[in-house]
Every structure is written in C-alpha cells, then in structure tokens.
Image (cartoon, grey):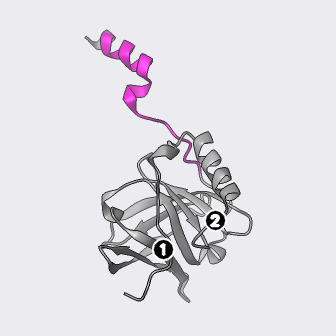
C-alpha cells in the first residue's frame, strides 16, 4: 500500500501540495514601508471575505514599534482592526510577523517591492495567503501584468486572486 501511495505522490507531486517560491526581499527599509497600502488583490480567506476598499496603515512609534490599522468595507459598513508588526530577524528583513489578537503572530512575507516602494507582493510561509499592495487605489495594466507575471514565476495561481474594489466610497 505504501508503494502505491509513493507512486501516486510522485505522479501528482508532493501529495498534491503546491510549492511556491515565497522567498522574501533581501532588503526592506521599514521606515519607507510605513504609510498606507491599498489591497489591490488577495487570495480568498475568511477574515477578509466579502470586503472591499481594503487598506492597511503602518505607523512606527518613537520607540520603533510598528502599529497597523487594517480597514475595509463589508455589507456597506466600514470595519477596522488594530494590530502590530515586528521584524523578528534583521538578517531576514522581509519576513515580518503581524498580530491582531493578543500575541498570536502570523507570517507576513514581503516577497517583492519596487525600488520606490509603490507596489508590494506579500505572502506567508504557506501558499494560502497572497496580496498585491499599492500606494495608490489603482495601477496601470502594464504594472498589473508585471506583478502577475512575477507571481506566476513564483508558482502562485493568479487565477485564484480576488481583485478588490477600490473605487471611491461615500462617507460611511
């Protein structure tokens, strides 16, 4: 039975698990990363399901701690959650950890960022989470194509991306 499983696994690759390249940037200037990022696209997950107009605001305190506020709209109501981020290992600057509840930190991998800190590709230690972020609510089709190509080259299924409505919202 074990031989059959091994054979089938070899045919279908690693037991059906998709392997992606989630390597992170070698250099990340946290101060330049601060500010507002708009979520242009994401993989579906329960904590943002049905949300539009999603953004994250990163703020560095005088003591060097990173605070963040994620905002979005669900069912016509503005929602927000406060959290914190940290860079646990300066030798791996793109591997951040974020927490929104007590001390439960999750991986937040900055995999790619353009030199001007206008666009970022963010993932995690698994292939289940993926975001395309921008300093602006929209990007050109050319930039979108370049970012999608980078994700495909890393093994991500870009057909699974949900593109987030970032159109103007009236006051809620």
Question: Few, some or many C-alpha atoms within 10 Å of disc 2 (few <14, some 14-19, many ≥20)?
Answer: some
Disc 2 and disc 1: Cα gap in Å? 15 Å
Q: Which residue is mark 2?
A: 139
What is the magenta range? 4-23
Q: In the rendered image, is residue 93 in sight?
A: no
> What secondary structure characterizes most of the magenta part?
helix
Residue depth check, mark 2 versus mark 1: number of the one nearer the observer: 2
Dividing the image into 4 quarters, which one contains the C terminus?
A: bottom left
Q: Secondary structure at mark 2?
A: loop
Task: State the residue in front, 149 or 92.
Answer: 149
Which of the 4 image quadrants contains residue 73?
bottom left
Asked if residue 2 is positioned above or below residue 77 in the image, the reply reads above
Asked if residue 150 is positioned above or below residue 87 in the image, the reply reads above
User: How many marks do you count on the picture?
Assistant: 2
Residue 119 placed where, x, y %?
64, 64
Residue 152 placed where, x, y %?
59, 42
Dividing the image into 4 quarters, which one contains the N terminus?
A: top left
> Does the segment drawn in magenta span residue 140?
no
Which of the 4 image quadrants contains residue 133?
bottom right
Task: State the residue in front, 58 or 63.
Answer: 58
Question: Few, some or many C-alpha atoms within 10 Å of disc 1 (few <14, some 14-19, many ≥20)?
Answer: many
Residue 154 placed where, x, y %?
59, 42
Residue drawn at (59%, 47%), measured in percent from left and top? Answer: 151
Residue 104 placed where, x, y %?
33, 66
Residue drawn at (38%, 12%), measured in percent from left and top? Answer: 7
Tell whether label 1 touches label 2 (CB within 8 Å): no
Q: In the rendered image, is residue 83 in sight?
A: yes
Q: Secondary structure at mark 1?
A: strand
Q: Which residue is mark 1?
A: 55
Asked if residue 5 is positioned above or below residue 21 in the image, the reply reads above
Q: Is residue 79 left or right of residue 30?
A: left
């Amino acid at each position: 039975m074990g031989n059959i499983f091994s054979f089938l696994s070899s045919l279908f690759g690693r037991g059906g698990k998709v392997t992606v390249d989630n390597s992170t940037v070698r250099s990340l200037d946290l101060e330049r990363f601060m500010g507002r990022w708009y979520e242009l696209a994401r993989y579906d997950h329960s904590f943002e399901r049905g949300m539009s107009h999603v953004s994250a605001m990163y703020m560095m305190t005088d003591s060097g701690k990173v605070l963040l506020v994620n905002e979005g709209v669900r069912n016509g109501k503005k929602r927000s959650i406060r959290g914190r981020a940290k860079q646990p290992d300066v030798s791996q600057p793109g591997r951040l950890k974020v927490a929104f509840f007590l001390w439960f930190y999750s991986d937040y991998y900055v995999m790619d960022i353009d030199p001007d800190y206008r666009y970022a590709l963010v993932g995690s230690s698994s292939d289940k989470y993926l975001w395309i972020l921008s300093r602006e609510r929209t990007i050109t089709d050319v930039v979108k194509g370049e970012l999608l190509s980078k994700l495909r080259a890393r093994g991500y299924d870009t057909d699974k991306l949900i593109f987030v409505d970032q159109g103007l919202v009236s006051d809620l």
